[in-house]
Structures are given as structure tokens and as C-alpha cells.
Image (spheres, rainbow, N blue to C red):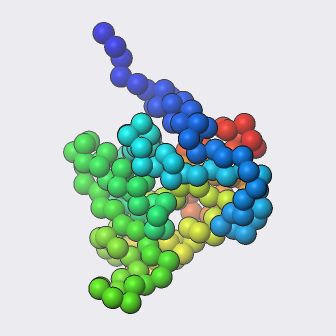
Amino acid sequence: MSQLPTSLDKRARLLELLKQRALIFREVTLASGQKSHFYIDGKMILMSSDSTPLIADLLYDLTADWNLDAVGGPEIGALPLATATVYRYHLAGRRLEGFCVRKEIKTHGTQKRIEGRLEPGWRVAVVEDVMTTGSSVLGAVEAVQEAKAEIVGVLCLLDRLQGARERIEGMGLRFEPLFTLRDLGLG
């Protein structure tokens, strides 16, 4: 009789996938403007049948006792994370809404900055795939705060250990990365 994988097993498998699929060694300019000799392309594991269930389970395990109403963050990186988390909550018989924050408001349609449902007073987790300084997630944090929702925590798949934690915690927010560069052997 086989046992179900534990959170530790899922974490180890996801880390292996991060190393195999998302870690690229070459000169790049990060969203923060900093130069780096390697890149973590989170999108390479955010939308894979191998990794999405692992991400969903790990984010659920991390947030299950946060009493959340919604999860979301900046468009692109947060969309697959929020969708996976919402689905995992559904599998657990729990309600959770997902949303994303646009960088720029569309000039057509509903012209909303926040897509999806987000109500004042809701408890929210803000998610992002990879964080360096935290600059990319700040727009989403501000939009959630403007919507008068309560940010319970900011989560990311990987923290590059270049100031995101300090910046987010400096705002009085909880910061929880699933992995850091140290887990990849790079920090």
C-alpha cells in the first residue's frame, strides 16, 4: 500500500522541478533593473501538470489556517498561482476567490485595475512567482489596500534574497516564500 506524498516530499519534488525547468544560467536584467548571471523563470513551472498540483498543495498547506477570502497578485505571475490555490481550496471543500491586479487599466471593457472578485474587509494573500526587491508586487499590494481588503500575507514561489523580505516586512506584512536562492544552492 503506497503512502500519499507528504508536504516535505512535495516540496522536494517542486524544488527539483525548479532546478530542472526554471533555473537558467546566463546574463539577464531582472524586473528590478539589477543584472544577474542567472534567471529563475517561474513561468516554466507555474503551468505544468507536474508542478501545478505541488504548488497548489504547498500554498494550501501554508495558508489553510489564515482564514482567507481571496488570493491574487500582479498579472502574469500571480494568475496561475491564484488559480491553482483557488482550485485546491475547492478540493478541500472551502471557498476562495481569486484575482489579479493589472499593471495598467484597460481602455476598453470594464476598465478595472483588479480583475476577479475582491471585497472590502476580505482577508487576502498576495502571491507572486519570483521576487527580487519586491517592487513588482508593491503595485498589487497598494491596489488591494486601496480596495480596503486586509493583506494577511505575501507569498512567493521563490525569493532571490535581494530585499523583498525586508521591504514587505517593513510595510508590516507577513512574507512567506516557498523557496529561496539558498534552496537552489545559490544564496
The residue under the point 51% across, 30% down is 13
Determine the image quadrant of residue 187: top right
Q: Is residue 75 above or below residue 156?
A: below
The residue nearer to you, when weighing 99 against 44, is: 44
Q: From this viewpoint, which residue is outermost toward the bottom?
A: 107
Confirm whether residue 153 shows in the render: no
The residue under the point 36% across, 83% down is 112
The residue under the point 57% across, 63% down is 173
Q: Is residue 96 above or below residue 2?
A: below
User: In what quadrant of the picture does the N terminus appear?
Assistant: top left
Residue 114, position as x, y percentages in the image: 38, 76
Residue 61, position as x, y percentages in the image: 42, 41
Please indicate whether residue 28 sits to the left or right of residue 12 in the image: right
Q: Is residue 96 above or below residue 106?
A: above
Determine the image quadrant of residue 82: bottom left
Please indicate whether residue 12 sits to the left or right of residue 111 in the image: right
Residue 18, position as x, y percentages in the image: 57, 40
Confirm whether residue 34 shows in the render: yes
Please indicate whether residue 87 sits to the left or right of residue 157 in the image: left
Residue 109, position as x, y percentages in the image: 29, 85
Q: Is residue 141 above or below residue 12?
A: below
Determine the image quadrant of residue 31: bottom right
The residue nearer to you, when weighing 65 against 20, is: 20
